[in-house]
Image: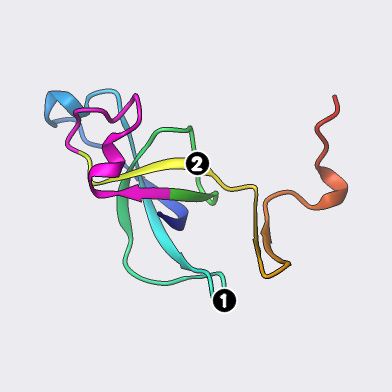
């Protein structure tokens, strides 16, 4: 698995029938050492409703075809989670919501 940031989308009118109805997003891998984008953009099938700028978790290869949306689809990369926070060695290196603005209470 890999962590990446959503940077755009792909629109394709003509495509194989097995890709109809799937949202394709452009993601850029994140290096966990410094939490900066590193590497070339990748196209991934969105299975969780991710949006621009969000940090997501990717599965590649045959693992990308293990979700209900991607099963038996021509997929090599799938977004399988939207990341809320990342902690390494006791240090939070990414948090989607600042502590003061996020609450599970309604």
> Element under label 1?
loop
Residue 67, located in which quarter of the rendered image?
top left
Q: Position of residue 10 (x, y in %)?
A: 30, 43
Q: Earlier in the sequence, mark 2 or mark 1?
A: 1
Q: Position of residue 26 (x, y in %)?
A: 36, 51
Q: Tell me the distance, in whole angstroms, between the alpha carbons under discs 2 and 1.
A: 21 Å
- Above or below, 13 against 81 in this view is above
Report the residue at 31% width, 67% height from top: 40
- Of the 4 image quadrants, the one containing the C terminus is top right
Decide which of 61, 10 is in the foreground and name it. 61
- Above or below, 66 against 1 in this view is above
Magenta part of the chain = 58-74
Residue 92, located in which quarter of the rendered image?
bottom right
Numbered tag placed on residue 2 in the rendering: none
Label 2 crowd (10 A; few <14 / some 14-19 / many >=20): some
Q: Position of residue 28 (x, y in %)?
A: 40, 60
Along the horizontal axis of the image, is 36 left or right of 20? right
- Of the 4 image quadrants, the one containing the N terminus is bottom left
Task: Name the residue beneath numbered marker 2.
Answer: 81
Decide which of 80, 63 is in the foreground and name it. 63
In the rendered image, residue 78 lying in the magenta stretch gets the answer no
Task: Name the residue beneath numbered marker 1.
Answer: 34
Report the residue at 21% width, 36% height from top: 12
Along the horizontal axis of the image, is 77 left or right of 13? right
């Amino acid at each position: 698995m890999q962590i990446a940031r959503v940077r755009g989308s792909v629109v394709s009118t003509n495509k194989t029938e097995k890709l109809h109805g799937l949202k394709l997003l452009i993601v850029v891998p994140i290096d966990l050492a410094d939490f900066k984008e590193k590497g070339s953009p990748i196209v991934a099938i969105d299975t969780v409703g991710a949006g621009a700028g969000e940090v997501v978790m990717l599965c590649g290869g045959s693992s990308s075809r293990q979700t209900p949306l991607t099963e038996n689809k021509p997929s090599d990369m799938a977004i399988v989670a939207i990341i809320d926070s990342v902690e390494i060695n006791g240090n939070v290196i990414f948090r989607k919501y600042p502590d003061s603005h996020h609450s599970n209470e309604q």
